[in-house]
Image (spheres, rainbow, N blue to C red):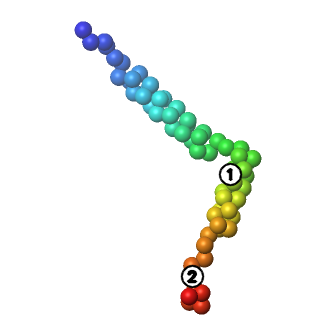
Amino acid sequence: MAEIVNLRRARKEKARRERTSEADMNRLRFGRTKAEKTADKDRDRRQRQTMAGKRLDPPTSKDR
């Protein structure tokens, strides 16, 4: 035989699981310290500068 399920309790448990998973996702997205954010910005800035320094300028008309 099938197991009897209390629908009200099942809905509440499902809602609780959804809230928990949403909270986990928000912790990953927004739960970073100021030092981590600063470090990421510095790393991105250094990477952009490095790539800009290695960029080859397109040939101009007087170079030809």
Camera-side residue: 25 or 6? 25
Q: Earlier in the sequence, mark 1 or mark 2?
A: 1
- Label 2 crowd (10 A; few <14 / some 14-19 / many >=20): few
Residue to which mark 1 is pinned:
40
Amino acid carrying label 1: it is Asp
Whole-percent x and y of residue 21? 50, 34
Residue drawn at 68 percent across, 62 percent down: 50
Whole-percent x and y of residue 53? 68, 68
Instruction: Find numbered disc 1 in the image and state the secondary structure of the residue it sits on.
Output: helix
Amino acid carrying label 2: it is Pro
Q: Is residue 4 above or below residue 28?
A: above
Instruction: Find numbered disc 2 in the image and state the secondary structure of the residue it sits on.
Output: loop
Residue drawn at 69 percent across, 54 percent down: 43
Tell which residue pokes out farthest to the bottom in this image.
62
- Label 1 crowd (10 A; few <14 / some 14-19 / many >=20): few
Whether pointer 1 and pointer 2 mark residues with C-beta atoms closer than 8 Å, the reply is no
Quadrant holding the C terminus:
bottom right
Residue drawn at 31 percent across, 12 percent down: 3
Whole-percent x and y of residue 39? 72, 50
Whole-percent x and y of residue 44? 66, 57
Residue to which mark 2 is pinned:
59
Q: Is residue 57 above or below residue 53?
A: below
Tell which residue pokes out farthest to the right in this image.
35
